Amino acid sequence: MKADVPLGLHTTLGIGGKADLFYEARDSLELVKAVRLSKSLGIPVTIIGGGSNILVGDKGVRGLVVKNVGGVIKIGKDKEPIGALPEEVGARWQADSTVGSFKYDFADLDYDEWDEKRVEVVVDSGVPLSVLMMSMADAGVTGLQWYSRIPGTVGGAIFNNIHGGTHTIGEVVEGVKLIDRNGEIREISSEALGMGYDVSRFHNSGEIILEVKFNLFRGDVDKSRWVIGEWAKRKSIQPGRSAGCVFKNIADADKERLGLPTGSVGYLVEHVLKLSGFRVGDAAVSDAHKNFIVNVGSATASDFVGVRNEIVMRAKEKCGIDLESEIILMGEF
Ligand SMILES: Cc1cc2nc3c(=O)[nH]c(=O)nc-3n(C[C@H](O)[C@H](O)[C@H](O)COP(=O)(O)OP(=O)(O)OC[C@H]3O[C@@H](n4cnc5c(N)ncnc54)[C@H](O)[C@@H]3O)c2cc1C
């Protein structure tokens, strides 16, 4: 365990004040030990994974920050196909991204594998999603190919129910093992996860994800590998020194009311709010994708918030839209 660790070193944005205490857990057992110790000492505990969806405040995070960075993958038994598409969780992210200056689309890569046999895979939450995806391809297992080039861990992916094309990761989750506010370990099934558009029960529950049980496919591995490669190529234009998309796509009703050709906030920022290139300190609207705010040097959280607030304010004033954040704010600002 270390004291006064700058969290900017542990986020993709490279922004953030210090953690009072910092510990790297290499599997779910170490994660449990760290969480129980901090609870017994009355120290607040915060979990981060790859730090790819967070903005950490300039004044840092009080108490203990546990970076969850590894673990094991266990492939279980094969099962019969379930053969039915899950209910749609919400499809706002499917908005056409081929409109405007930022163009990419995954529609041609999409296919259905719900008729394939299933396979149970249990993974520690600290395993990087990319490691899981490639290990599954090597083991002849598919179903995660839509999440190619998404940085971060399995825990972070469940926390926000990540999306790729028309898919959300909740589609293939069977259950989660967690540690609750009292330090008790419990297992819950997918129905209890409260997964929606960029949301899960973990946003409000104070619970920590230890292990995830997936229900993946014995699908076409060559096809899946091709999708992984192609998807990564298309996503490579997204700026890495960011925390991903800053805002959720615009609701359909607002899109129609404003006569917008797409629900993409990047389009709104560029063509309606005219904020291309807008910058505060070293934080700027990305040239590559205008729903990304990037750190172009030594940006502070306050710089980032300055850019973000300008977009929020102009969207409200000019379009009457309340933009919703896709990024998690952490610590003191
Ligand atoms: C270039 C780029 C591209 C991206 N593309 C996509 C994309 O296509 N689709 C998409 O949905 N997202 C995307 N993202 C956003 C981000 O990568 C994902 O949300 C990712 O899953 C976050 O995982 P993480 O481990 O980095 O979480 P972190 O950023 O470390 O944490 C995010 C939140 O999850 C919580 N958390 C993390 N682990 C646990 C745990 N074990 N238990 C409880 N809570 C936990 C944290 O406390 C925090 O509140 C992108 C980001 C970048 C930088």
Image (spheres, rainbow, N blue to C red):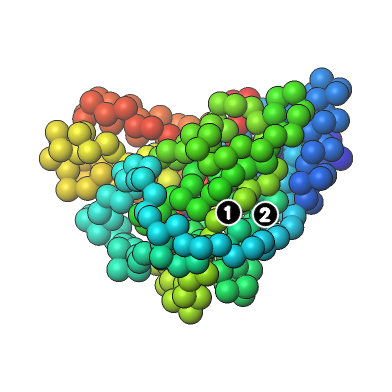
Left or right of 15: which side holds 323? left
In which quarter of the view is residue 8 placed?
Answer: top right
Q: CA distance from mark 2 to mark 1?
A: 8 Å
- The x, y position of residue 307, in whole percent, is 42, 36
Looking at the rendered image, the quarter that the C terminus falls into is top right
Q: What residue sits 82% from the left and 31% below the top?
A: 36
In this rendering, which labeled residue sits more in front, label 2 or label 1?
A: 1
Q: What residue sits 38% from the left and 55% below the top?
A: 84
- The x, y position of residue 67, in whole percent, is 73, 44
Q: Is residue 116 visible?
A: yes
Left or right of 225: which side holds 30? right
Q: What residue sits 86% from the left and 22% below the top?
A: 41
Left or right of 253: which side holds 29? right
Number of numbered labels in the structure image? 2
Q: Which mark is residue 86?
A: none
Q: Callout 1: few (<14), some (14-19), or many (20+) C-alpha neighbours within 10 Å?
A: many
- Helix, strand or loop at mark 2: strand
- The x, y position of residue 76, in whole percent, is 66, 61
- The x, y position of residue 6, in whole percent, is 72, 40
Q: Which mark is residue 123?
A: 2
- Give the residue type that dot 1 points to: Phe
- Helix, strand or loop at mark 1: strand
Q: Callout 2: few (<14), some (14-19), or many (20+) C-alpha neighbours within 10 Å?
A: many
* Contact between labelled residues 1 and 2, with CB atoms less than 8 Å apart: yes
Viewer-nearest residue: 294 or 21: 21
User: Residue lying furthest front in this view?
Assistant: 80
Left or right of 316: which side holds 139? right
Residue named by callout 1: 214
Q: Is residue 103 above or below residue 328?
A: below
